Amino acid sequence: MLKFTPVKIEDRELFEQHSFMLGEGSCDMAFANIFCWAHLHNPEIAIWGDFIFIRFGGVNGKQHTYMEPIGVGDNISAFKVLMEYVGTLNEPFKMAGISANFAEKLRTSVPFCGYYLYPKRSQFDYIYNADLLRTLSGKKLQPKRNHINTFKKLYNFTTEPLSSSHKKEVLQLVEEWREGKENADLEAYECEREAIERGMDNFESLGLQGLALYVDKDLAAFTYGSAINKNTFCIHIEKGSARYERSFAMINYLFANTLSEQYCYINREEDLGIQGLRDAKLSYQPIMLYPKFSLIEIFGNEDKVEEIKRSTEAVEIAMLWREAFGDDEESIEQYITKIRALGKSYILRDRDAIIATADMFNFVGEFGKCSYIYGVATKTDYRGKGYGKALMKDIFECLYRNGANRCMLIPGNDNVAQWYISQGFSKVTNETISLLNDYEYDFGRGENESNTPQYRIINAEEYLREYAKLHPQKNFCVTVKDSVLLPNNATFRVEEGKIKKVADKCDNLMNISDLFDAYPIKEDSYFMVRMFR
């Protein structure tokens, strides 16, 4: 039977022995966070073999919430031990802060008939390249360099390493910061103030490192944090005075430059779902968002689970985009929150997790409407198993039912273009197109890339009817083969601007992927409109 006891400062060495070996980059793996926020979360620790367990709650009517087993080895067995233990407590099993690595193990190793595992975007950590925060190099960080230069011009400043001796000044600045927030949540402020005071009282014992920024001997800003593992440092607290312009940007920059070069990454923790905080963290160009998952028991939470499924769909798609395309976080955030809802989304799931996705937008050009397929992505572990093909089939059938006669896309590279040909798309055309829209979003390959599309005929009869009207002098017969959209398998005779389906096959036998190349209806440009969803 596991025995949980309250977390003490003396547990730091044991905790870090296990957490550093595990090597995860989550801010939840910082012992200082667990200890300093004990008044709010009531953390407890238990040992089982080579693993330790941490749980929170259990007071004031709060149910326990557990972290993933911390240690190296058979963590699935450790998880099952934890489940069995919770089963003896007559309370639901809940976990939070689960790493992507462990979440994937759970999905593939544990029969989740009674539990729901989902990503929680508000708890994703922002991970930065430490050298980038030290230099602020690049066009996108030019505004941050401007902030630094402004501060340097305005103030005579000095710095010194933060320590417990700064406690009085630190708490005075925290109070000043709170007074400057008219709509501050007083309860949240008191909780954070107590966490800071607990940190300052145990600064050295917690292994904290920090920096104090002074302007003419007045504390203008301070920050501190601790190591999560051998190459990642986590920023726990950062506060600046509103009396000094750009104090936050300056303390951020200066502290990054004081950290040891062994820290390749800096974790600036979560945004808690606060939009202003999210925008500020994204503006520093994180190299990744560290995903974290939660787990709840379905029984008794059915309505909540359905609500979570709806609310986390965009989060899962954003995660898949990062994996598939490697776009920067700001671009992904813009697309997911502002652009994606303008179209129609298609997804495939495996045991509730999204494994493949694509979006479809509707454009109109000189020759009528054409549906544009965008953001086709499949999780790495699921590629080559037919999931992408199944997703495209769903899209084609939906377009057919909605009256589309063709669709298009812009392939990311030559290998992808070949795969699309196998799904019935034409060869890549030599014509470039411009996808114009009112949302300042680039639907193409990028500023310096040519947007050369591929087309897929959805309804061969309607497409050839449109072609015949545009080319009344063309007379021909064609037998079409389409392994996906079976109604397209027919023989069509085109004469004097009209089309007729005939019973017999003709010598002109053509796969659907070759039909556009043989009888193209070319587009010059497209303008985004709302047509059908």
Image: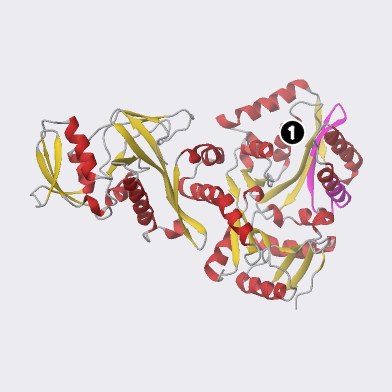
Mark 1: secondary structure: helix
Residue 80 screen position, x and y as percent = 64, 74
Residue 203 % position (x, y) = 84, 50
Question: Is 272 placed left or right of 407 in the picture?
Answer: right
Residue in front for this viewpoint, 357 or 284:
357
The quadrant of the image that shows the N terminus is bottom right
Q: Residue at x 74, y 33 (%)?
A: 248
Measured as percent of width and height from the top left, residue 319 is found at 53, 50
Residue 510 as seen in the image, left or right of residue 161: left
Q: Amino acid at mark 1?
A: Phe
Tell me the residue that label 1 is attached to.
Answer: 248
Q: Quadrant of residue 173?
A: top right
Which span is picked out in magenta? Answer: 193-222
Residue found at the very far bottom of the displayed protein? 1
Q: Residue at x 23, y 40 (%)?
A: 463
Tell me which colouring the rendered structure shows. secondary structure
Q: Is residue 206 magenta?
A: yes
Q: Quadrant of the C terminus?
A: top left
Query: Is residue 98 inside the magenta stretch?
Result: no
Looking at the picture, tell me which residue is in the foreground, 240 or 280: 280
- Res 433 → quadrant: top left
Asked whether residue 263 is in view, the answer is no
Q: Quadrant of residue 28?
A: bottom right
